[in-house]
Image (spheres, rainbow, N blue to C red):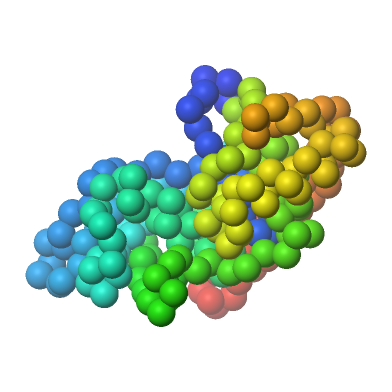
Amino acid sequence: MSSPDTSAVSKTIYVSHTGLPLSFEFEWPFRHATSGADFDVLHAVITLENSGGLRALVAVNLSVTLREVLPSLEPENTEAPVINALRKEVDNKQTEFVKSGKLVPLPFSSRHYNFKQQRWVFGKASDEEIARAIERKVYWQTRVVGGDVWLGDPTEALYLDTTADHIAEIAAGLEKRKLFTLVRRFATALPALMDQKERFESEMSEALHQLEEKHAFERG
């Protein structure tokens, strides 16, 4: 497996529900489709960290219906839900990671938005799932990038369908188990967490194996 990328100090790792550590690069801004179709497109690269260079090149296609509920197409209004929509596609095994590949269209549509409640919906996580997500977040961010790990990221709260305050409450419980120290919602990993390398890499390997099996089956 690859060593930590100490030069990428600004890189943020977002872990899928299945345990895959991901990072995202976007070619802002959204651009109107040149094909004449009525949607906007944002090109992105999803990198599967700790994999030796596996990635997915995607074109995020923003539907007209969803565009109407967004305050703007600027990153401050779209980056968090786009990251989570792409993360959901990974969890749903709709994204394939390869060394090189062609650009694949992925929908950014109203299925991720509850119009009645006027909010984003990516699936409700239990407290146990939130705790597991925190452990993975701190492990992989520390392993790949290093430094302290911010647990107040609203993108994470949005994906788990909870609040940053509730994440902080659960993180405080994990701190009591000596997995990390916590200061103003910044976690510093301790050996009790980082020594679980086999667990986290096993989760990643199993999730990647299942994803690859699914795409191999579809190709016949």
Splitting the image into 4 quarters, where does residue 188 fall? top right
Question: Residue at horizontal 35%, vertical 71%?
Answer: 109
Question: With 204 as the anchor, is 100 left or right in this view?
Answer: left
Question: With 101 as the anchor, is 202 left or right in this view?
Answer: right
* Residue 183 at x, y percent in the picture: 70, 27
* Residue 111 at x, y percent in the picture: 42, 76
Question: Residue at horizontal 26%, vertical 74%?
Answer: 65
Question: Residue at horizontal 15%, vertical 71%?
Answer: 38
Question: With 211 as the anchor, is 107 left or right in this view?
Answer: left
Quadrant of the frame with the C terminus: bottom right
Splitting the image into 4 quarters, where does residue 194 fall? top right
22, above or below 150, in the image: below
Q: Is residue 100 visible?
A: no
Question: Residue at horizontal 33%, vertical 60%?
Answer: 60
Q: Residue furthest top?
A: 7
144, above or below 174, in the image: above
Q: Nearer the viewer, residue 122 or 48?
A: 122
Q: Nearer the viewer, residue 67 or 50?
A: 67
Splitting the image into 4 quarters, where does residue 144 fall? top right
The number of discs equals 0
114, above or below 87, in the image: below
* Residue 98 at x, y percent in the picture: 50, 52
Q: Is residue 120 visible?
A: yes
Question: With 210 as the anchor, is 108 left or right in this view?
Answer: left
